[in-house]
Image (cartoon, rainbow, N blue to C red):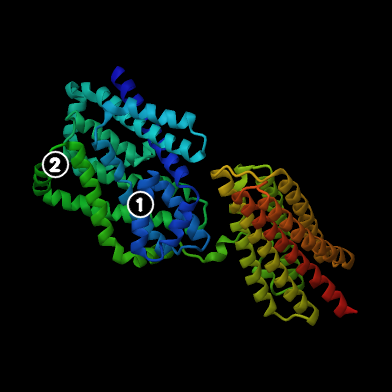
Amino acid sequence: MKVAMQAILGLGLFIYGMTLMGEGLQKAAGKKLKAIVGALTKSTFRGVLVGAFVTMLIQSSGATTVMVIGFVNAKIMTLTQAVGVIMGANIGTTATGFIIALNLGQYAPLVIGIGTVFYVIGKKRSAKSIGQAILGFGLIFLGIMTMEQGLKPLGTNPIFTKFMADLSSPILGLIVGVVATTALQSSSAAIGIMQALGMQGLISLGAAFPILLGTNIGSTTTAVLSSFGAQKTAKRAALVHFLFNLIGSLIFLLLFSLFKGTFIPFMTSHFTYLPTQIAMSHLGFNLINTAIFLPFTKVLVRITETLIPGGEDDEAVSIYLDERILTTPAIALGQAVKETERMAEMVSLSLDEAEDLILLEKFSVYDSLMDRERLINRMEREITDYLVKLSQASLSQTEHKDVDDLLYVINDIERIGDHIKNIVELSEDMEEEQIKIPEQGIEELREMFTKCKEAFHKAVDAFLLNDMELANEVVSIEDMVDIMEEEYRANHIRRLANKYCDAPPGIIFLDCISNLERVSDHSDNIAHYVLRRNALED
């Protein structure tokens, strides 16, 4: 019982340390990490390099895969490009084995102490994140040292000795690796246990290598299970990961069975420390496996598309659009208007939250705002595609004009969403650099937000109700916003000149009012569609 408790304690510390370090490094890297991944994965090979680098940085191949699936869904990255990042993530996750092989358990208390100091006294979010990462790094070594000491008595246990003897069967070792990784939900944890056993001489490389291959298969089970009920791109990405690891592991298991007598002496002659042998074997497997499959990424993608058929229409975010009713254009047009209204409600919510984000520093809403912006972009594409198909149906002249107006309106609503996104992104610097907008600037921004929200709400209502009175009110508000923008810009430049405000908050303020003025401009565009429509009818 004592052995089990100490081993479980060590495993818990190890997994918690991995989580802390990964989260800390991810927070320290910031949201710009996603932009780097999106920009540097234009080719599959570069995707491999980026996948390896990002996974080494955030210590989680799962987090990298989730990020990649998000890019595929947002149309930033194709599934073929994503395959490269997934392959690279497998390479990057081997870094954990080398960290363990350093065997720095004796320094764990010092590292934990340094990390705690950074985390407690750090004022900036980046300093706290670095402290969290250092703390996690120390807990990894403390966990391995605790596991190592807890597993030591197993060397004299006859049941354990017999079990290890049975592991001479490569297939049994593979199964053990799959089951252990699936149960622990972490290939790094399974490999960490193997390395802890290796430190005590309780496992041989011959028994460890098939288990290692099994951990690669087991690491995909979480993604596969979580993809059930998800969109097709997520399912395909999970299936690519599973097929890549499964086929590679089975090939290497066969090669290991055939060349075991050559492989083990080679590794033991070059690396005397067993944990290092395990780490090098893990790295070698993933490098060679990637080199073998890299030229066949498009084949893997085609296989997944065959196994999971269907196009993007099956992944629609709209709830009112149905191509089966395009044969009745009047009803189809009404459904498109409903979907446009739903899209406008999302933009309205984002405008409210953007105000809270900037004026009240509610940085917690950042991620939900960015997620909603991606959803708005997809809705705009789906409504546009739907209206283009509708325009090809047999429509009256009035219906053709309504379709054209609706196309213009959804474009303006989407552009308002883009300007809200620009405002939201300003909050990154506010949070990271602890930038404070002066009180007078806050009040001016609050007034502009109020007018811009009023203009947008009235513009949407004017379009939906075909209300000229509301449309004329929007035109008047737009004129007021133009005057406010000029006045507030001049006020802020005076504040800068008189040194009542520093440059960083000044830049954020000016960018905010510029984007808010553009929100009002697009609301004015929507109002003018209503005015022109009624002028033509007269």
Q: Is residue 353 left or right of residue 252?
A: right
Report the residue at 68% width, 42% height from top: 360
Q: List x then y, in percent, for residue 420.
A: 66, 56
Q: Quadrant of the N terminus?
A: top left
Q: Secondary structure at mark 1?
A: helix
Report the residue at 71% width, 66% height from top: 336
Q: Residues within 10 Å of mark 1 (few under 14, many from 20)?
A: some
The quarter holding residue 464 reads bottom right
Position of residue 396 relative to residue 510, above or below, is below
Q: Nearer the viewer, residue 172 or 241?
A: 241
Q: Secondary structure at mark 2?
A: loop
Q: Amino acid at mark 2?
A: Phe
Residue at the disc numbered 1: 53
State whether residue 367 appears in this view.
Answer: no
Numbered tag placed on residue 303 in the rendering: none
Q: Amino acid at mark 1?
A: Phe
Q: Nearer the viewer, residue 11 or 37?
A: 37
Q: Is residue 384 left or right of residue 149?
A: right
Position of residue 187 relative to residue 293, above or below, is above
Q: List x then y, in percent, for residue 438.
A: 68, 45
Name the residue furthest top.
2
Numbered tag placed on residue 271 in the rendering: 2
Mark pair 1, 2: CA separation: 25 Å
Q: Nearer the viewer, residue 35 or 216?
A: 35
Report the residue at 18% width, 33% height from top: 203
State whether residue 310 appears in this view.
Answer: yes
Q: Nearer the viewer, mark 1 or mark 2?
A: 1
